[in-house]
Image (tube, helix red, strand yellow):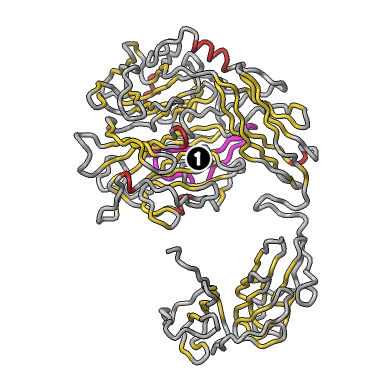
Amino acid sequence: MHPTAIVPTRRPTGALRIGTLWIPLLLATLAGRAADGALDMSFNPTQEAWRWSYGMTAIEGRLYVGDATHGVVRLREDGTGDDGWRLGAPLMPPAAALARTPFGDWVAVDLLGRAFLERADGAWNRLPDAPSLSPSYWPISLLFGPGDSILVSGRARFGADGRRQPEITYRQHLVGAGFNDSPRLLAGALNVAAVQDGRGRLILGGTFRQAGGVERLGLARFFEDGTLDSTWNPGPSLGLALVPTNQLNRVPYQLALGPDDSVWVSLWVADADAPGPATLRLVHVSAEGTVLADFPSGAMGGDPPPIVQPDGRLLVMGRFDRWGDTPATGLVRLNPDGTVDSSFEVVLTGNRVLVRSAAADAAGRLWIAGDFDSVNGVQRPGLARIFAWTPEPAAPEVRMETAAPRLATNEVLLLRARVAGIPPPDLQWFQNGEAIPGATNQGLRLVADQVRSPAQFQLVASNASGQRPLDFPTVSFAVRSPVPGRLDAGFDRRMTHLSGITQVVPLPDGRLLVGAGRWEPTGPAGPRVARLLPDGSPDPSFGHQGVVSGLGTVEGLSPAADGGLLVFGQLTELAGQPVSGIGQLDGHGRFVPRDFPPLDIPHVSAVLPLEGGGMVWAGRFTRIGTQPAFRLARLDPGWNPDPLFSSPLERWQFVDALGLDAG
């Protein structure tokens, strides 16, 4: 989550409230507010244990801190612990990361790398396959994807039920690389930091050399569906390169989202071009992947991600006593070009000052935790709050992020919006003009029986500067489920007449092709190919009452643009005609005579159409026509074997699938 992002959730009241928390806070902040860098004297925590806190985040103007006893605690405005708030998830030891989802759920990761999801009713789930490294050596990021999904450190995506969504597992998209001069525990591990931009794209940085099957040294951007954004590749411009031992010379280890979907990158540097004793650099990369700024960093370790202010200036924390020629101990504010902002000065004292954690809120207040004793001459052992910037009041802005136009039985309606405004607006959801009790988050989650069809949903955002409604498309009920992975109650077809189903191929019009024959490859001719209507019933316009008979096993179905169909496998008969491993049907399931070359063993396991009309076949054959072809052959557009193509397969090898290399 972006360090300054605030999730405007509210306790249920059943009525729309106007800034009950944030307006007094903002007014108090603006009225007689101290200068940037001044210590907030009203925040005076007394527990020195906070200096060892790794996880710290600000939500709704309240601070949440990792705690060795409870995992995470909430602090009041004066810095004392709020004993009335606790998470039920068993975090041990202190929390390394905590966030609240747009739907009001809590997500937490402890220092053992275990991730938990806790719902509003107190029920919690352990998220499987969470990061297995210690967060004390690498940042843990909690981001939110489509619907109510959760992204943990750019590694994997989970649903609100705690189950992993296998189609988005970014670690499987990455190929690791070590670091050739590890100042921390970076070498040999696939460490990943992550941020999400305003368009939902995920930016990953870490010790990897490939992403999505192509070279991406240390930095990559993915779309929400998990595909690589091929247009974004700043690594070469940042000097990232592989050394002969297959390691990176520089590692992006911290990321922060900047204005206009740009990103700030903290780099560990191991090559000789790092000036002076600095081992870090800060780099500003545009949304297009170009380098906007690149300068040495004074931080030497333990530093959290930079925090980007609304005006683009950068708060940088860590272990250092100067920044360039400017004295600065553990905390400095930089202008977008990397120069020190002299209007912001915070003096931290102690033995080897280190700012380990930081968090900021929309009121411009900055919390810092780490190894220090005093701030600006005032005793604050390990935890303090500082005035960082003056927020400018702004009317609410709301933008639709997700919308579901239809809903099926036993499903869950998920609506979500992106909300902005200063102070952060109070929110209220309405259904058919009536306020939904307790629905005061950026997201709305309702089970189907709570929705009256057709239903009109509206989100109203309000603060002291105004009110802004957002109307969602009308939600209606549907028989067929539009949600991937949900059982469609309208599709219930027992295909007992198809012996051993081997292939299922959905067609663009909702119909379905089915191949069969696995259990009776040498038995009497029977149904081998079927086409079903969207409701699961046989398509009477295909074959004989929806099926085409044959002898053997279907191992592949390849629909053609003209509605025809290639059928292949261990086949000797199709639609009453002899075939040698492969045959063709037209759009109505009728046999199409083709001069396919005969095979000595009638078995085709895979077919790859080529540009220009040729094909590549794979199977158990050793000859195609009169030409030797050991289990692999290439055919020209006239179905003639290519004599220049020689199979590279060994006798123990067998091909199940064929595909073209993107290169």
The furthest residue to the bottom: 626
**Part of the protein shown in magenta:** 117-143
Q: Nearer the viewer, residue 422 or 495?
A: 422
Residue 592: percent from the left, percent from the top?
68, 82
Q: Nearer the viewer, residue 303 or 629?
A: 629
Residue 539: percent from the left, percent from the top?
78, 69
* Left or right of residue 502, residue 288 in this image: left
Residue 561: percent from the left, percent from the top?
64, 69
Tell how many labels: 1
Q: Nearer the viewer, residue 421 or 172?
A: 421
Q: Is residue 425 above or below residue 147?
A: above
Point 35% across, 24% down: residue? 333
Q: Is residue 369 visible?
A: yes
Residue annotated with mark 1: 115
Q: Nearer the viewer, residue 58 or 33?
A: 33
The amino acid beneath tag 1 is Ala
When asked about the image quadrant of residue 356, the answer is top left
Q: Is residue 103 visible?
A: no
Magenta stretch: includes residue 137: yes
Q: What secondary structure is found at the residue carrying circle 1?
A: strand
Q: Is residue 331 above or below residue 639?
A: above
Point 53% across, 40% down: residue? 199
The furthest residue to the top: 32
Residue 602: percent from the left, percent from the top?
58, 85
Q: Is residue 497 above or below residue 200?
A: below
